[in-house]
Image (tube, rainbow, N blue to C red):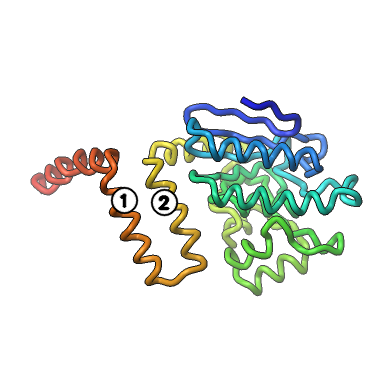
Amino acid sequence: MAAYERVLVEIDGGIGTLTLNRPEKLNAFDRELCRDLVEALELLAKSEAVRVVVITGAGRAFSAGADLNTLGTDLPALVAAGKDVVLTIRAAPKPVLAAVNGPAAGGGANLALACDYRIGSDQASIGQVFHKLGLVPDWGGSFFLPRLVGPSKALELVWSARMVPATEALALGLLDRVVSDAELPGEARRLAQVWAAQPAAAVRRAKEAVYISEVTSLASMLDLEIAQQNELFATPEARERIGAAVPKRSARWSAS
């Protein structure tokens, strides 16, 4: 396992947990954290020991976004790192779950939005705070935000530069689930365990298909589904699962 200074990486039971580890700076991004984040994500995305990736933050924040103390010199590197991070998450052949344990601002908000699913603490908040610095969303914010909340709401959130509390973030779709702060680590792990127990090949194809659907037609998606289904039907795992399911279904119908 590679060692990193600004992120913690743990692999246990098929779940790879990546923890942003600058709690004294609210896990704000500097050049070193971005480098470690990119490398750790690539490691977990490629590891055969990992079925699900969980991203969270140490301390009381998920991430405050860019470290303002280094923004003047490191802005180009921080923005470029966002592209690498987001594309690695989307290309990862496994689910990537954000456990949003506190404020997620700017690039930190969009790191969470880049993930496949977001479970948040009731102490979490998400904000596109870029206008406070005279900037615009990066790390994929201009892509993710309108797809989640619609164009007009996306613009309101960007123009207001406000932090959205957990309950509102849930209603808008910025968070997919909210639990108490104490429950967050356990609930995130339980959800990851459910996904990790699913067939890896089917999980990978489903993720590919959902994101391809954003940029293609219905007819193309139907063709892709046929190709994926035929491919998976031939796998030993699918045949074993189908074979195990048939007697159970027959028994239920007989009982009724």
Asked if disc 1 and disc 2 are in contact, CB closer than 8 Å, the reply is: yes
Which amino acid, by three-letter code, is at mark 2?
A: Arg
Along the viewing direction, whichever of 209 and 17 lies nearer the viewer: 209
Within-10-Å neighbours for mark 2: few <14, some 14–19, many 20+ = some
Q: Secondary structure at mark 1?
A: helix
In this rendering, the answer to whether 236 lies above or below 147 is: above
Q: Position of residue 195 (x, y in %)?
A: 43, 41
Q: Place residue 8 in its image quadrant.
A: top right
Along the viewing direction, whichever of 251 and 225 lies nearer the viewer: 225
Q: Position of residue 96 (x, y in %)?
A: 55, 45
Farthest residue toward the bottom?
152
Q: Place residue 227 in its image quadrant.
A: bottom left
Q: Position of residue 66 (x, y in %)?
A: 80, 49
Tag on residue 255?
none
Q: Secondary structure at mark 2?
A: helix
Q: Position of residue 170 (x, y in %)?
A: 58, 56
Which amino acid, by three-letter code, is at mark 1?
A: Glu
Q: Residue at x 17, y 45 (%)?
A: 249
Say which residue label 2 marks: 205
**In the picture provided, is 156 more to the left or to the right than 1?**
right
- The N terminus sits in image quarter: top right
- Looking at the image, is mark 1 or mark 2 earlier in the sequence? 2
Within-10-Å neighbours for mark 1: few <14, some 14–19, many 20+ = few
Q: In front of the other: label 1 or label 2?
A: 1
Q: Residue at x 57, y 59 (%)?
A: 173
Along the viewing direction, whichever of 51 and 112 lies nearer the viewer: 51
**In the picture provided, is 131 more to the left or to the right than 142?**
right
**In the picture provided, is 207 more to the left or to the right than 251?**
right
Say which residue label 1 marks: 231
Q: Residue at x 15, y 45 (%)?
A: 252
Q: Residue at x 63, y 59 (%)?
A: 168
